[in-house]
């Protein structure tokens, strides 16, 4: 596409002035952003000091710095059994599926939203698909339960009237990978597609007008204009999602299956395992150790991804 | 720019270091407080009751209270004032500040409060929050040993073994809450059904396994639409002492009475038989349709989902009164299934002083009063007489005319939550001897106690093995208990194989070793 | 999109209608359950058709939670103030990061992104906010911790400014000796209305739905509770009593229509958002335009 090339050429031709000159140019902006940066430091960076607790045996009486060191002792419980393999596999595989399907579905919906010209109708659709995002996972668990329970809608409303045999979902693990993916999509697609849709709304209309003049069909407009323009947003959102590759939505994997033991093989993730084993102990250190490990692994993945992106398209790299 | 940012970051680190070392400074002051107050303690011992004459200078002890169930107007301030006036009248040298926590959010809020020396909490109970072992491990409470001499009667309120449940390595960290310290298993069934199937003669008797099964079978024949069993994990019904752990990896058989050997429960024949029995019950339709939907048992009777269920109680009278309170619309028949046994799991609560408490001496005084002074403790357990409750001629407490749960402003129905409910009054219960019967259990020659009462297994040496086994137990236990697995043999086999792979034998060996030490072998 | 595909537009409408049903149907099922007598559901199963209509759940909610009106007021207050502050902080930082030739840009981006990966957890956050900044038991406890700025939104804003605001316009403005701050108000904000409205929406939702700050920082001041905290507390309380057999010693917990109350809670908390959403979207976009012109 012409405009993409033009933009790339423009940025290549752009020669950076000296740091001093740029500092002089941007100093009001730094000043403007100072409160934001201060907030990050207070709200996010200062509590990070607490991460050292992952290597300590936290004592409520002695506080963060007074607690005795413990080395890597807080991590071993994560690797001491067959559960290690299961929880890492589940966490990563579900995340991969979520990222791929979630992104595709959200873009699809965003494009459809862009087709709706009537603003009231569009707002209505937007509001409706955002509803699932608004409720807590605990509540979603009860919605799911209303469908899947032995007296749920699927059994009493669909299977029984048609003469099929009732299914005990909460003890049958073969269904759960699909159920979990479906619930995740259901809850998340509205939010993500609203982000993509906002991006699409901001595109310069003239591209599309020119394309129509050139005789491009809807499909061509999507593949040749919308998707390339969306690329930076897709890349950024994906990189951010990759950073959470080793974390999981606790509610999705714990509340939705109602913590049913027979489903553990397909529902155990690092977060649910940690919760189940530490639930009654109030062991701040071990819980933090698991979180720290998840962050570090995610961090490494993000650095790798970002490096690759920077090699290929430096403009779209996150940092 | 990087430099500036680096500087900013460094500043942030310094700030947060200062913030957290602020804590150390506070700790110093706390130590000072402790030393000064223990100094006054010595003075006290020498010169008798020598507290400051001005109550406004007395330390304020923050005491946990349990919230009203409904979100109505709370009368917390009135009750707090009444308590403080009383403390002044007896020249106690301490004042209280009540912190009301709702059960649902309590675990999180308590954890936060226990990190906070400025606005934390001084006195709290461990029930539904943690165990004494974990509190000590996390250093969330302090040792009460220094006060044993000053308050010797606090150690004589209950049977001696009960105190061991709140000890770690022989040191008292928590004072157990008054209770029956033992229960037996009962089964309750709608009386109209019992009459219908012609087994009314059995009511109030102790049933054998065969009789119990016959009762259930006949009831199911008459009412196939109802379930008869809501929980299958009652340790009293199974007849084991789980030593207070839900995982049942090592247990004492025969309710722990006279038992010196830790049983590898999941490899035992008894467990296997129980699984088959539950499978059989499930096949016969005794269970409610979906065990995951853990409805309140009594509520399920009201909804006509079940016709009976298992529960525990310390006396038949008590069980009957509980039924009257919970199911006023139904006439319920009670059947006894087991004997009265006391175990770790029947010592339900204990109260302790937090490690962020700045005035442990005064906190101890309050804890002592809550355990021994009925006037003081009843403010907390019942509220103010005439406002939240009235007492009838038989010594039972009731809501006053026109006051109920939603309007009283205080949770008067939760005496069992506080340090010593036995100095309270029976509340909204027809049973005038509610607490006297409870106390009578302690000296009843028929009361039996598990040999494991007071034995607290420390999982630290086998921590990783224990956690791995816990995960496996969670995967299989309930499924087997509720008879949800078709091939019991196969499930038991893989269950046991996994437990062994996760280091079960190491856990059992460690458990036996500690138990031997406990028994003094 | 400039459309010539009428067929595609019809297709879009149909698919979105289906998705709307997909998103909302579970709530309809639960709403019907909330007004159905609980025993009927247990015995006969869940259904979209109401039977044995019973409003006791809503009655319980209204009598049980007396402070509900006040809690609504508190929620609105914190949402409005929070969202405005959040927008200012997010735009300032997002705009700074959108400058491609900004010295230290990569480091700053990294600085923002890093906070999305690592967190010190509940206890250290509580210690900082409660002991250093003393927000406990005050209105600031609701406003400040965690919600005032989301790094996710900052990065969204940055990406939007870089990709959707044409460089040519910015360069032209620079020629006209427009200041960097002026460009934010005169060019970037007016050109980014959709994303700003979206981020404002996310921020408002975050404040509206938050109960964590209430739970952590308002342990004793019930008079400052927000609606979500009140409802969440109630729900936790019900869960607790359902899961804890011993707790049934408290008489009369059996009267609580647990399932129905849960759904009633959902209805009560979602309804206001549904009602203001379309209004909010339009008004907000308009507000931004006015602000942009004046700036």
Image (cartoon, coloured by chain):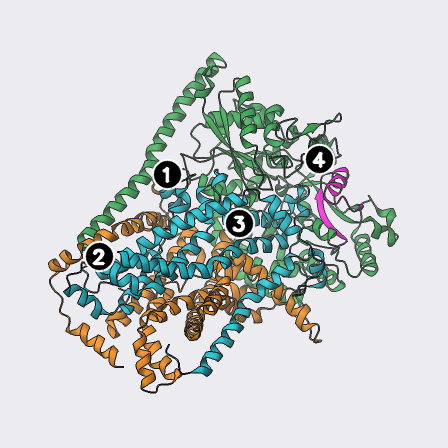
Q: Is residue B469 visible?
A: no
| Residues marked 1 and 4 touching at CB (< 8 Å) | no
Q: Which mark's residue is nearer the viewer, 4 or 2?
A: 2
Q: Which mark's residue is nearer the viewer, 2 or 3?
A: 2
Q: Residue A255: x, y in percent? A: 54, 58
| Residues marked 1 and 2 touching at CB (< 8 Å) | no
Q: In what quadrant of the picture does the N terminus of chain A appear?
A: bottom left
Identity of the residue furthest to the bottom in this view: A215
Q: Which chain is green?
A: B
Question: Helix, strand, or loop for circle 3?
Answer: helix
Q: Residue A190: x, y in percent? A: 46, 66
Q: Residue B515: x, y in percent? A: 57, 44
Q: How many marks?
A: 4
Q: CA distance from mark 1 to mark 2?
A: 34 Å
User: Residue C232: which disc?
Assistant: 3
Q: Which chain is orange?
A: A
Label 4, residues with CA under 10 Å away: few <14, some 14-19, many ≥20: some
- Residue that carries the numbered disc 4 in the rendered image: B428
Q: Are marks 1 and 2 on the same chain?
A: yes
What is the display colour for chain C?
cyan
Question: Helix, strand, or loop for circle 2?
Answer: helix
Up/down of C106 relative to C221, above or below? below
């Amino acid at each position: 596409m012409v405009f993409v090339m033009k933009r790339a050429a423009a940025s290549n031709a752009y020669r950076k002035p000296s740091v001093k000159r740029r500092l002089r140019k941007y100093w009001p902006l730094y000043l403007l952003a100072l409160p934001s940066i201060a907030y990050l430091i207070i709200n996010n960076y200062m509590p990070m000091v607490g991460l050292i607790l992952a290597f300590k045996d936290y004592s409520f009486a002695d506080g963060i710095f007074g607690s005795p060191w413990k080395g890597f002792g807080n991590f071993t419980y994560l690797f001491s059994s067959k559960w290690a393999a299961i929880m890492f596999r589940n966490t990563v595989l579900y995340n991969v599926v979520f990222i791929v399907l979630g992104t595709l579905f959200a873009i699809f919906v965003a494009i459809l939203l862009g087709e709706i010209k009537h603003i009231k109708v569009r707002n209505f659709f937007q509001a409706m698909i955002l509803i699932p995002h608004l409720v807590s996972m605990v509540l979603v668990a009860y919605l799911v339960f209303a469908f899947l329970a032995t007296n749920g809608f699927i059994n009493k409303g669909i299977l029984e009237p048609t003469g099929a045999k009732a299914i005990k979902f909460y003890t049958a693990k073969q269904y759960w990978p699909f159920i979990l993916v479906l619930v995740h999509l259901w809850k998340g697609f509205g939010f993500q597609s609203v982000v993509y849709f906002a991006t699409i709304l901001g595109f310069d209309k003239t591209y599309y007008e020119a394309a129509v003049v050139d005789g491009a069909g809807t499909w061509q407009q999507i593949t040749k204009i919308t998707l390339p323009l969306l690329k930076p947003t897709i890349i950024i959102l994906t990189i951010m999602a990759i950073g959470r590759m080793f974390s999981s939505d606790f509610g999705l994997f714990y509340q939705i299956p109602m913590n049913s033991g027979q489903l553990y093989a397909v529902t155990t993730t690092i977060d649910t395992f940690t919760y189940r084993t530490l639930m009654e102990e109030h062991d701040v250190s071990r819980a933090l150790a698991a979180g720290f490990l998840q962050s570090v692994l995610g961090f490494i993945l993000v650095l790798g991804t970002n490096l690759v992106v920077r090699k290929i398209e430096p403009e779209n790299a996150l940092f | 720019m990087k430099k500036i940012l680096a500087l900013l970051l460094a500043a942030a680190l310094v700030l947060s270091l200062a913030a957290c070392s602020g804590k150390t400074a506070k700790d110093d002051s706390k130590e000072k407080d402790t030393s000064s107050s223990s100094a006054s303690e010595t003075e006290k011992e020498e010169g008798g009751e020598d507290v400051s004459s001005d109550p406004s200078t007395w330390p304020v002890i923050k005491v946990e209270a349990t919230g009203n169930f409904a979100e109505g107007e709370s009368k917390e301030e009135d009750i707090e004032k009444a308590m403080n006036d009383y403390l002044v009248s007896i020249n106690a040298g301490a004042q209280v500040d009540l912190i009301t926590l709702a059960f649902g959010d309590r675990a999180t809020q308590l954890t936060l409060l226990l990190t906070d020396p400025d606005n934390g909490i001084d006195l709290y109970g461990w029930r539904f929050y943690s165990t004494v072992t974990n509190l000590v491990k996390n250093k969330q409470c302090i040792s009460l040993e220094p006060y044993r001499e000053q308050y010797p009667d606090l150690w004589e309120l209950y049977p001696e073994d009960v105190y061991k449940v709140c000890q770690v390595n022989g040191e008292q960290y928590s004072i157990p809450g008054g209770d029956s310290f033992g229960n037996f298993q009962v089964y309750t069934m709608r009386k109209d059904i019992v009459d219908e199937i012609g087994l009314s003669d059995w009511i109030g008797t102790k049933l054998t396994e065969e009789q119990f099964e016959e009762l259930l079978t006949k009831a199911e024949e008459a009412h196939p639409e109802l379930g008869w069993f809501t929980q299958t994990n009652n340790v009293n019904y199974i007849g084991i002492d789980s030593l207070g752990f839900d995982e049942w990896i090592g247990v004492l058989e025969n309710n722990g009475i006279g038992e010196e050997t830790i049983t590898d429960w999941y490899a035992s024949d008894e467990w296997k038989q129980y699984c088959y029995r539950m499978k059989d019950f499930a096949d016969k339709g005794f269970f409610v349709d979906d065990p995951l939907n853990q409805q309140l048992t009594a509520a399920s009777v009201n909804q006509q989902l079940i016709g009976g269920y298992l529960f525990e109680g310390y006396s038949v009278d008590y069980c009957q009164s509980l039924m009257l309170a919970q199911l006023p619309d139904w006439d319920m028949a009670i059947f006894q299934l087991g004997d009265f046994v006391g175990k770790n799991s029947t010592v339900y609560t204990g109260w302790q002083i937090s490690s962020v408490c700045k005035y442990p001496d005064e906190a101890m005084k309050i804890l002592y009063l809550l355990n021994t002074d009925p006037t003081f403790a009843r403010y907390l357990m019942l509220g103010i007489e005439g406002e939240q409750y009235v007492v009838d001629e038989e010594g039972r407490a009731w809501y006053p005319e026109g006051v109920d749960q939603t309007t009283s402003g205080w949770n008067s129905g939760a005496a069992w939550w506080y340090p010593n409910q036995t100095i309270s009054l029976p509340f909204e219960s027809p049973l005038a001897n509610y607490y006297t019967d409870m106390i009578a259990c302690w000296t009843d020659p028929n009361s039996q106690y598990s040999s494991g009462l007071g034995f607290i297994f420390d999982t630290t040496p086998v921590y990783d093995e224990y956690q791995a086994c816990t995960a496996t137990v969670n995967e299989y236990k309930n499924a087997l208990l509720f008879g949800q697995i078709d091939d019991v043999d196969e499930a038991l086999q893989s269950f046991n194989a996994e437990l062994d792979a996760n280091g079960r034998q190491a856990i059992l060996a460690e458990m036996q070793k500690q138990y031997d030490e406990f028994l003094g072998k | 999109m400039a459309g010539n595909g009428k067929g595609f537009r019809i297709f879009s409408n149909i698919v979105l209608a289906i998705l709307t049903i997909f998103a909302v149907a579970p709530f309809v099922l639960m709403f019907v359950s909330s007004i159905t007598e609980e025993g009927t559901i247990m015995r006969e199963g869940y259904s979209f058709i109401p039977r044995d209509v019973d409003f006791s759940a809503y009655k319980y909610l209204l009598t049980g939670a007396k402070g509900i009106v006040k809690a609504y007021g508190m929620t609105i207050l914190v949402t409005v103030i929070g969202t405005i502050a959040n927008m200012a902080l997010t735009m300032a930082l997002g705009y700074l990061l959108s400058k491609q030739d900004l010295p230290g840009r990569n480091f700053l981006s990294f600085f923002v992104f890093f906070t999305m990966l690592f967190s010190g957890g509940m206890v250290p956050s509580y210690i900082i906010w409660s002991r250093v900044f003393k927000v406990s038991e005050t209105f600031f406890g609701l406003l400040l911790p965690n919600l005032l700025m989301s790094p996710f939104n900052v990065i969204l804003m940055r990406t939007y400014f870089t990709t959707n605001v044409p460089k040519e316009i910015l360069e032209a403005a620079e020629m006209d000796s427009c200041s960097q701050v002026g460009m934010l108000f005169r060019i970037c904000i007016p050109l980014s209305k959709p994303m700003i409205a979206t981020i404002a929406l996310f921020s408002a939702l975050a404040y509206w739905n938050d109960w964590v700050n209430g739970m952590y920082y308002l342990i004793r001041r019930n008079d400052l509770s927000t609606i979500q905290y009140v409802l969440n507390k109630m729900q936790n309380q019900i869960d607790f009593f359902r899961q804890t057999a011993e707790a049934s010693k408290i008489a009369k917990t059996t009267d609580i229509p647990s399932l129905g109350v849960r759904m009633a809670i959902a209805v009560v908390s979602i309804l206001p958002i549904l009602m203001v959403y379309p209004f909010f979207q339009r008004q907000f976009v308009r507000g931004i335009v006015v602000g942009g012109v004046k700036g």
